[in-house]
Amino acid sequence: MPDVITSDGSIRQDDWVVVPRPADGESLDIPEQPALIPADLWLAGKEHFEDRDDIGVWLDSHDEPETLAGVVNELPVIAVNFPKFSDGRGYSIARLLRERLNYQNELRAVGDVLLDQLQFMKRCGFDTYVLRADKDINKAARCLNFFTQGYQAATDTDEPLFRRRAS
C-alpha cells in the first residue's frame, strides 16, 4: 500500500484504493477494502452502497462537484484527481466542495501530485495527499508549511493578510 500525507505533515498508510472507471460494457469491480469509485457511478447506484461506510468517490478534473450537492457529507472521503500537474481545475473543485457544498469530511488529492503543490492544495481545503510515486514523501511536511502566512483569503483563513495586519 502507498502512503498518504496529512495536512499536519504526518505520513500514514493509505488503506483506500482508487477504483478506475470500468471500460464500456464492463461492470464496476469494488474490492472488500475501503474504495474510492467514480462519483457518477456512486450516484447512479447509491442505494447499493448504503450498507458500506468504506466507499468514497473520486472526481476527475472535468467533473462538476455540484452533482454531489445534498449528499456530499454522506461520503467519508472525496478524492480529486490531478491528471497532470499543470491542470489546476482540482483546486477549484476543492474550494467548491468546502465553501459552497460545505463538505466536512476528508478531501484527498490524487494523481500527478507534486511536493511544490502541497501548500496550495492545503489552502484550497485538501486534508490528505497521495504523492506521485517518484516523489520523496519524507519532504512533504516541509512543503506543506513552507510559508507561514498566505496573502489571499482561502479555506484556511477568511481574511486577506492586509486585513489581518490592520486588526
Image (cartoon, rainbow, N blue to C red):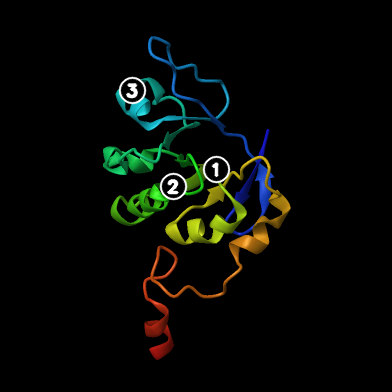
Asked whether the viewer can see residue 17, the reply is yes
Mark 2 or mark 3: whose residue is earlier in sequence: 3
Question: What residue lies at 41% left-to-right and 53% top-to-bottom?
Answer: 91
| Residue that numbered label 1 is attached to | 112
Query: Where 22 falls versus 13 (above or below)?
Result: above
Q: Mark 1 and 2 residues: CB-CB less than 8 Å, in contact?
A: yes
Q: Quadrant of residue 153?
A: bottom left
Gap in angstroms between the C-alphas marked 1 and 2 = 9 Å
Q: Earlier in the sequence, mark 1 or mark 2?
A: 2
Mark pair 1, 3: CA separation? 32 Å
* Residue matched to label 2: 87
Choose mark 1 or mark 3, whichever is in front.
Answer: 1
What SS does tag 1 mark? loop
The relative height of residue 155 versus residue 58 in the rendered view (above or below) is: below
| In this rendering, position of residue 165 left or right of residue 6 | left
Quarter of the image for the N terminus: give it. top right
Q: Residue furthest front?
A: 86
Closer to the camera in the image, 91 or 165? 91
Visible in this render: residue 167?
no
Tag 1: amino acid: Asp
Distance in Å between CA atoms under marks 2 and 3: 33 Å
Mark 3: which amino acid? Glu
